[in-house]
Image: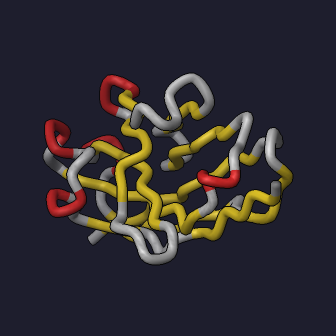
Amino acid sequence: QVQLVESGGGLVQAGGSLRLSCAASGRTFSNYAMGWFRQAPGKEREFVAASINTAYAASVKGRFTISRDNAKNTVYLQMNSLKPEDAAVYYCAATTNPASVNIVTAIDYWGQGTQVTVSS
């Protein structure tokens, strides 16, 4: 089992920045590919970023940066130039299948989510 706990969400004005953190506990953190997903009201959960090959969704590329610190069992998502359409609940995700870290159904573990609200 892997437990994932996100933090860092909140309310920010458009153009602002937030940094999300995801602390992992349980199994060996370095064995997992980590990613971030988000889900806005009425929409499906969607891929945002993955630590493997630092892949990004087209909608966030150039504005968001994912990083991980294996010594701290933590993965981060730095979000800059936020837009109202970035508002969503952001979820940390872990999978043992790095080739599928961008696929919702391939995720083994999810965090509880953290709310990001962007005011225009």
Q: Residue at (26%, 45%) from the top-left corner? A: 102
Name the image colouring.
secondary structure
The answer to which image quadrant residue 53 occupies is top left
- Where does residue 17 sit, x and y in percent of width and height? 78, 42
Nearer-the-camera pick, 35 or 79? 79
Nearer-the-camera pick, 74 or 67? 67
- Where does residue 18 sit, x and y in percent of width and height? 74, 47
Q: Quadrant of the C terminus?
A: bottom right
Q: Residue at (65%, 38%) from the top-left corner? A: 78
The answer to which image quadrant residue 76 occupies is top right
Q: Quadrant of the N terminus?
A: bottom left
Q: How many discs appear?
A: 0
- Where does residue 64 sit, x and y in percent of width and height? 58, 34
Q: Residue at (14%, 46%) from the top-left corner? A: 97
Horizontally, is 105 left or right of 54 in the view?
A: left
Nearer-the-camera pick, 2 or 10? 10
Q: Is residue 4 above or below residue 54?
A: below
Q: Is residue 106 above or below residue 61?
A: below
- Where does residue 32 sit, x and y in percent of width and height? 27, 47
Q: Residue at (40%, 26%) from the top-left corner? A: 54
Q: Is residue 32 above or below residue 55?
A: below
Horizontally, is 58 left or right of 27 in the view?
A: right
